[in-house]
Image (cartoon, rainbow, N blue to C red):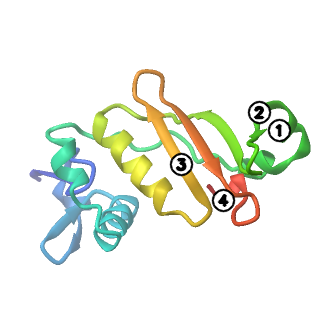
Amino acid sequence: MSKVKCDHCHLEFSDDVMIHDGEYRFCCNGCRGIFHLLKDEGLESFYSKMGSTTLSPPAEQFEASSNFDTPAFSERFVTTTKEGLSQVSLVIEGIHCAACVWLNEKALHKMEGVIEAHINYTNNKARITWNPADVKLSAI
């Protein structure tokens, strides 16, 4: 068995578990899916910005995003601008390089209803402004 690098996360893995997709090699279907999403959205420059950094797979999937739409959450964390837009600051876990910041900001700006999105690399805090008539926070 030899080791190969995943074309998305750049982590090494055993070639006996490799997922081939044309000329590309992936360690899992998650990496393959994200790789194609970035290509389809014209965001493949993420990989040049990433350089030799490797990505870590997420520890667990956050399933309670619907809690973001509750009145209790809104009262505590969401503010309303004078234009009627909503704003929130959230910590995004797993950001470990400038390429992560760039990719997350680009992805957020492409979402319908998101007006602004700025991520502070030093504290991983995202400041998001959106139109609640167009999108729910849980969808963001």
Could you say where residue 4 lies in the image, as x and y percent from the top left? 13, 52
Query: Which image quarter is the C terminus in?
Result: bottom right
Tell me the CA gap for discs 3 and 1. Answer: 20 Å
| Mark 2 burial class by Cα count in 10 Å: few <14, some 14-19, many 20+ | few
Judged from the image, the secondary structure of the residue bearing numbered disc 4 is helix
Q: Is residue 61 left or right of residue 18?
A: right
Residue 116, relative to residue 127: is it above or below? below
Q: Earlier in the sequence, mark 1 or mark 4?
A: 1
| Mark 1 in CB contact with mark 2 (< 8 angstroms) | yes
Judged from the image, the secondary structure of the residue bearing numbered disc 2 is helix
| Mark 4 burial class by Cα count in 10 Å: few <14, some 14-19, many 20+ | few
Rendered image: mark on residue 98: none
Along the viewing direction, whichever of 112 and 104 lies nearer the viewer:
112
| Mark 1 burial class by Cα count in 10 Å: few <14, some 14-19, many 20+ | few
Tell me the CA gap for discs 1 and 2. Answer: 6 Å
Rendered image: mark on residue 73: 1
Residue drawn at 67 percent across, 38 percent down? 88
The residue tagged 3 is 116
Tell me the CA gap for discs 1 and 4. Answer: 15 Å
The residue tagged 2 is 77
The residue tagged 4 is 139
Q: Residue furthest right?
A: 71
Along the viewing direction, whichever of 20 and 85 lies nearer the viewer:
85
Residue drawn at 76 percent across, 37 percent down? 79
Instruction: Give the label, 3 or 4, closer to the camera.
Output: 3
Q: Earlier in the sequence, mark 3 or mark 2?
A: 2
